[in-house]
Image (spheres, rainbow, N blue to C red):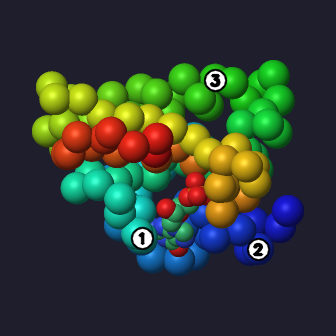
Amino acid sequence: MDRKDCIFCRIADRDIPSPLLYDDEYVCAFRDLNPKAPTHILIIPKKHVASLAELEEEDFELVARIARVAKQLAEEEGIAEKGYRLLSNCRADAGQEVPHLHFHLLGGRRLSDIC
Ligand code: DGP
């Protein structure tokens, strides 16, 4: 996919302005447009990978990087102690809307529902 056709590539490329809570060579993070919890952050790889199902062997390191960023952001957001959820919806049955791999970091309330 052309990066111009992917909304999250465009955010990562700073083509669409969205305040970044975290930014390095491989990963960035920004707040979800439709937050489902007091803290709702999306963490993405800058490389275009459509979903978990499209990860190639050389991409798995990106997932570890994202887990590290999630831990850091949870501490910064003050949700680490009480708890939080990190999840990625993969393809249609999971309700994936944006076809660029992303992890939702959710917290700040009791997360009793599925996601
Ligand atoms: P998912 O269903 O897992 O594909 O979730 C996609 C999320 O992305 C959804 O919660 C709304 C959010 N989202 C969609 N477009 C944008 C956008 O342009 N900016 C931001 N910040 N979030 C977006």
**For the residue labelled by badge 3, is the local secondary structure a helix, a strand or a loop?**
helix
Is 5 left, or right, of 23 in this rendering?
right
- Which comes sooner in the sequence, label 3 or label 2? 2
Distance from disc 3 to disc 2, alpha carbons, whole Å, reads 25 Å
Q: In the rendered view, tell whether residue 42 sits above or below residue 107.
A: below
Residue at image point 66% right, 62% down: 98
> Which residue has dot 1 on it?
33
Residue 59, given in percent of the width and then of the height, sits at 73, 30
Distance from disc 3 to disc 1, alpha carbons, whole Å, reads 27 Å
What amino acid type should be assigned to the residue bearing mark 3? Answer: Glu
Residue 25 shows up from this direction: no
Q: Quadrant of residue 86?
A: top left
Is the residue indicated by label 1 positioned so its CB lies within 8 Å of ligand 1?
Answer: yes
Residue at image point 16% right, 29% down: 82
- Which comes sooner in the sequence, label 1 or label 2? 2
> Which residue has dot 3 on it?
61
Please state which of the two labelled residues, at mark 3 or mark 1, is closer to the viewer.
1
